[in-house]
Image: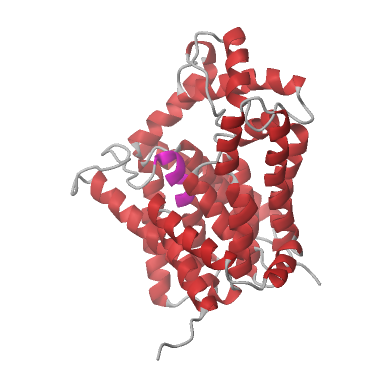
């Protein structure tokens, strides 16, 4: 006779599998998500689920953020693109509350370990491509070896993994010698990997992460934290600049294209500056409620034709703040910031130092990188943000 189906334990296996698959494969992660959502939606006990979700301010903020996108459809002319945005943002309405509901704090180490194993696998594969031991595949090239996703997504996710590794080495007091060796090895290899791949936003996130970690390490001495940051961050930057050709070239290009913006509009940096300038002209005229959830492509095309007709229009300004401000105005921007506010606030209520520290680091790192791309729209980075948010901020509120 079959044993009784243990739904709660099944959820934990699925969450561990999701944490492993989310940096590796869109199909695999989506399959796990579908199974989790299907089980949750048809498992009953809806009243208890509702009250658990609605009692957490982060979950409420996430749902409101999505609902504003729905309301923004009321003054949207391009309904088709609006529906596309609603589809991309559904994680904030349904997936985050569902994962929050089923996640259990006693399994947090398993979730994080599963994620770290996946990043280690990705990193090893990256080196195999870089050393030309295996042929480049999917997104990877020998000069930019990011195999399972583009460097735009890979480097920010790698920065989060490096934070966890550094934290284990420098802030955990009960680490065994074996775990210390493993973490030290991957701390070095991941750091090198960060600068042999081409994700500039992730590299900026790395230095932001390092700054946050230093302040957490010297939490009782702000002056020592500041001095360490002023010494260590430039040291690592110039070491990477002198030893990594791709980092050297991309730093030079970023500086040159920023200084010479008018003649470098077609560069990645130049395009982002141009997107921001054009978008700001639209935002000024629609500052409170925006132009609607689906009208960014059409409205940007109009202003681009006026300001920079030689440039191709875009459907994404590669800046999360610009995108939300244009779509939903100041109301949408405040709603998005409320998500990060409650993440940080809830973190400070945790008695577990690691949960508190990473709970603060996650939103701060995303607040930095969202200046360079719409990282709450991309599959990989959004899913990492949602999965970590589902268990880092659970049951932290004071009763």
Q: Is residue 54 visible?
A: yes
Q: Which residue sits at x=41%, y=76%?
A: 177
Q: Position of residue 372 (x, y in %)?
A: 55, 34
From this viewpoint, which residue is outermost toward the bottom?
A: 1
What residue do we see at 26% from left, 44% from top? 130
Rendering quarter of residue 189:
bottom left
**Which quadrant does the N terminus fall into?**
bottom left
Q: Is residue 298 above or below residue 365?
A: above
Left or right: residue 55 versus residue 189 is right
Could you say which is closer to the camera, residue 203 or residue 370? 370
x, y (%) of residue 84? 55, 36
From the top left corner, tell me how far across and down residue 116 is, in percent.
43, 62
Q: Quadrant of the C terminus?
A: bottom right
Q: Residue at x 61, y 13 (%)?
A: 302
Quick check: can you spot residue 227? Answer: no
Is 154 one of the magenta-colored residues?
Answer: yes
How is this picture coloured?
secondary structure
Residue 20 sits in quarter: bottom left
Residue 27 appears left or right of 78: left
Q: Up-down: is 296 above or below 188?
A: above
Give the total number of marks visible in the rendering: 0
Seen from the viewer's position, the closer of residues 69 and 207 is 69
- Please tell me which residue is depicted at 36% across the width and 62% down the height of the picture: 185
- Is residue 299 in the magenta section? no
Kindly report the secondary structure that dominates the magenta region of the rendered protein.
helix
Expressed as whole percent of the image width and height from the top left, the position of residue 118 reads 38, 60
Q: Which residues are magenta?
A: 150-158
């Amino acid at each position: 006779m079959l044993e009784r189906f243990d739904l709660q334990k099944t959820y934990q296996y699925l969450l561990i599998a999701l944490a492993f698959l989310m940096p590796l494969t869109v199909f695999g992660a989506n399959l796990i998500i579908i199974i989790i959502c299907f089980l949750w939606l048809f498992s009953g006990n809806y009243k208890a689920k509702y009250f658990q979700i609605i009692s957490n301010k982060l979950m409420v903020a996430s749902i409101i953020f999505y609902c504003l996108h729905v309301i923004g459809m009321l003054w949207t002319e391009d309904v088709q693109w609006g529906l596309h945005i609603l589809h991309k943002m559904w994680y904030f309405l349904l997936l985050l509350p569902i994962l929050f509901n089923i996640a259990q704090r006693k399994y947090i180490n398993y979730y994080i370990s599963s994620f770290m194993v996946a990043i280690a696998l990705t990193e090893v594969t990256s080196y195999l491509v870089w050393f030309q031991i295996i042929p480049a595949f999917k997104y990877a090239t020998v000069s930019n070896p990011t195999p399972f996703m583009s460097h735009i997504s890979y480097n920010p996710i790698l920065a989060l993994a490096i934070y966890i590794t550094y934290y284990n080495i420098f802030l955990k007091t009960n680490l065994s010698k074996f775990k210390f060796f493993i973490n030290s090895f991957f701390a070095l290899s991941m750091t090198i990997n960060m600068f042999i791949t081409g994700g500039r936003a992730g590299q900026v996130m790395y230095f932001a992460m390092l700054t946050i970690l230093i302040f957490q390490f010297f939490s009782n001495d702000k002056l020592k934290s500041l001095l360490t940051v002023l010494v260590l961050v430039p040291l690592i930057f110039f070491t990477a600049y002198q030893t990594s050709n791709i980092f050297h070239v991309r730093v030079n290009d970023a500086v040159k294209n920023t200084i010479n913006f008018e003649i470098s509009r077609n560069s990645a940096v130049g395009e982002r500056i141009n997107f921001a300038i054009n978008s700001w002209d639209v935002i000024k005229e629609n500052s409170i409620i925006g132009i609607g959830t689906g009208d960014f492509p059409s409205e940007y095309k109009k202003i681009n034709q006026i300001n920079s007709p030689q440039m191709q229009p875009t459907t994404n300004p590669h800046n999360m703040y610009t995108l939300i401000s244009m779509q939903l105005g100041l109301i949408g921007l405040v709603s998005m910031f409320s998500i990060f506010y409650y993440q940080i606030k809830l973190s400070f209520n945790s008695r577990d130092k690691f949960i508190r520290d990473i709970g603060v680091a996650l939103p701060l790192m995303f607040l930095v990188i969202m200046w360079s791309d719409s990282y709450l729209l991309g599959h990989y980075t959004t899913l990492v943000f949602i999965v970590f948010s589902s268990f880092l901020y659970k049951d932290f509120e004071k009763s």
